[in-house]
Image (cartoon, helix red, strand yellow):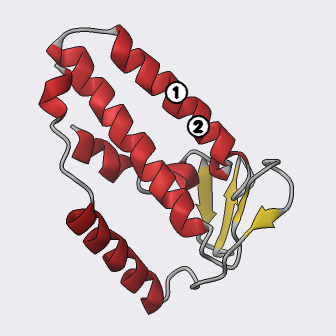
Amino acid sequence: MIALGIVAGSRGPDRLEIPSFNPKTKERRSLIPHRTLTHWPFFWFAISILVITIFLSFDGLLIRSIILSMIGFVIACWLHLALDILTPAGIPLLNPFGRRVTFNVYKSGSSSEILIVLVIILFTQIFLPPINWLAFF
């Protein structure tokens, strides 16, 4: 269930902007401006606290399974933000509509982005201990 949530959340901050694409003009528009509220770490911190609180408040395999997918979604959104802060556009840290912070390591869509993702995957597989999620049930 966590993996399902991670797959759904990998593009979560971008999808929550409610984007639309005009094929004639090849222009992307969204209801929420890109890299504003949905890319603001405080927003995801609040969502994380909410999801953890819900997880700890409920018993039962079905409810906990659904909540585990929500946890996976939030984890993927945090990773999305971590990767976006490395791009030239950056993410807003203090104000969702204010100045963005960037480390300007790579450009989105470049081959260096794939390399960064592979390094992160390798790092997590080598250095982070496995979590026994069944212990939470």
For mark 1, give the secondary structure: helix
Q: Is residue 46 left or right of residue 95?
A: left
Quadrant containing the N terminus is: top left
Per the image, the residue denoted by label 2 is 45
Residue lying at 51% horizontally and 23% vertically, measured from the top left: 50
Residue sitting nearer the eye, 106 or 56: 56
Residue drawn where x is 66% and y is 76% of the image: 103
Vertical relation: 36 (above or below) 49? below
Up the image or down, 35 lies above or below 59; here it is below
Q: Is residue 132 above or below residue 62?
A: below
Measured as percent of width and height from the top left, residue 110 is found at 49, 88
Q: Residue furthest bottom?
A: 111
Measured as percent of width and height from the top left, residue 120 is found at 36, 71
The image shows a total of numbered marks equal to 2
Q: Is residue 127 left or right of residue 32?
A: left
Look at 21% across and 23% down and name the residue there: 136
Q: Is residue 13 above or below residue 56?
A: below
How packed is label 2: few (under 14 Cα within 10 Å), some, or many (20 or more)?
A: few
Real-space Cα separation, disc 2 to disc 1, in angstroms: 6 Å
Quadrant of residue 2 within the rendered picture: top left
Q: Residue sitting at 19 percent across and 10 percent down?
A: 60
Quarter of the image for residue 34 reads bottom right
Left or right of residue 64: residue 74: right
Q: Which type of secondary structure does the marked residue at label 2 adopt?
A: helix
Three-letter code, disc 1? Ile
Image mark for residue 49: 1
Amino acid at dot 2 = Phe
- Which of 48 and 39 lies nearest the eye of the viewer? 48
In what quadrant of the picture does the C terminus appear?
top left
Q: Are marks 2 and 1 in contact (CB under 8 Å)?
A: yes
Q: Position of residue 36 (x, y in %)?
A: 74, 52
